[in-house]
Image (cartoon, rainbow, N blue to C red):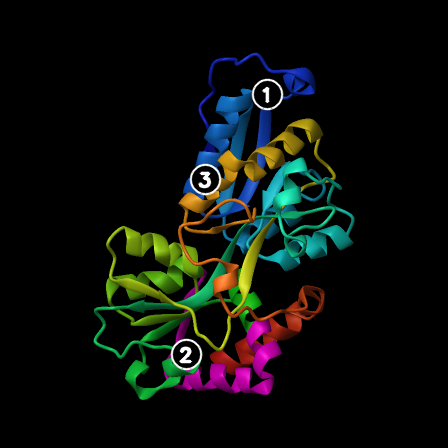
Amino acid sequence: MFRTTALAASLGLMGTLAQADTLTFYTAGPGELADALAEAFQAETGITVNVFQGTTGQVMARLEAEEANPQADVVVSASWGSAVDLHERGLLMEYTSPHAENVPDFLKHSHYVAQGISALAIAWNTQSGTPRPAEWTDLASEDYRDLVTMPDPAQSGSAFDLIAGLETAMGDAAWDLLGALADNGMIVPGPNAAALNPVLQGAAAAVFGAVDYISYARAADGESVEVIVPESGTVIAPRPMFILESTSNADAAKAFVDFVLSEAGQALVADTWMMPARADVEGLRPGITDLNVIEVDEDAASARRDEIIARFNETVSNR
């Protein structure tokens, strides 16, 4: 859905920003964060932000469709690999925000930087009548027959990252686990929201590979859901933010990136239950140092994307 913030009264723009009265921002959810950042940035600069919010797959598909006539200035994806791929294709502008000095090195690059970070977890309905799971493998037990969902890695960049991470940590045993989950009746209904909704509604008991910040937020709202991160390890999903080389609003785009990485912008990120990218901004939930993080070679995983998704489809869909 296309969201455009209301045009505010002129705030007396300064310098080169005076020539840019609009900015186009494409982002893979959450929508409330996109709107909050757009509104706060407009209040500070007077620049109207046009927001397109969707899944990572939808955002990337839109960029591909518009490649001959690019519309976006700044983009946030839920998959680090998408930024790697676009950079390798020469489509990203080099820019390092001054605020990036407070972002850990592994969360930044000369052409992209994390907006925030989520982790992949089990989202368990505490009223489901099933035993509380502790490990990924628990969801393949008879207790969870026909009660597990998983986001589709072809539509969810974070689900793809989880598969790549489990393969890194477990080797072929990761594929055996996915096969066992499929044999146990696991369904793959679509992107992250499609996997979580049946659990929130009580039709299923747990999500294998839920994006944790979404479930933390729903639990804070009173939903019967608990976020469980297996001690055996999980992957984090930093959300890369980047400026397209094709932008005609480079100064405004840089100012927007600066704002997102400012203390005020990172506080808005934290309010959505994501981990802030900046190490000096406190989050509302456990941070990276509280997790057993599986390190994944993002470049290698990105290069094998089609192969991994094809193997997932063969393993899970053809049981």
Pair 3/1: label in front = 3
Tell which circle, 1 or 2, labels the residue nearer the N-terminal end: 1
The structure residue drawn at horizontal position 47% and vertical position 44%, both measured from the top left corner, is: 269
Quadrant where the N terminus sits is top left
Is residue 50 toward the left or the right of residue 138 in the image? right
Residue bearing mark 3: 268
Q: Position of residue 132 (x, y in %)?
A: 29, 76
Q: Position of residue 181 (x, y in %)?
A: 42, 82
Question: Which residue is labeled 2 in the image?
Answer: 135
Q: Residues within 10 Å of mark 1 (few under 14, many from 20)?
A: some
Residue 147 in view (yes/no): yes
Q: Which residue range is magenta in the image?
A: 164-191
181 in relation to 266, above or below: below
Image position, residue 248 (x, y; %) = 71, 29
Magenta stretch encompasses residue 169: yes
Q: Is 168 placed above or below 289 here?
A: below
> Which sits earlier in the primary sequence, circle 3 or circle 1?
1
- Dividing the picture into quadrants, the one containing residue 188 is bottom left
* Label 1: element kind: loop
Give the SS element for disc 2: loop
Q: Is residue 157 visible?
A: no
Judged left or right of residue 140, residue 255 is: right
Q: Nearer the viewer, residue 107 or 140?
A: 107
Identify the residue position indicated by label 1 in the image: 21
Let me know if residue 121 is in the magenta part.
Answer: no
Q: Nearer the viewer, residue 40 or 86?
A: 40
Q: Residues within 10 Å of mark 3 (few under 14, many from 20)?
A: many
Which residue appears at 65% of the width and 42% of the height? Answer: 100
For the residues labelled 3 and 1, the Cα–Cα distance comes to: 23 Å
Where in the figure is residue 120, as x and y percent of width and height? 47, 65
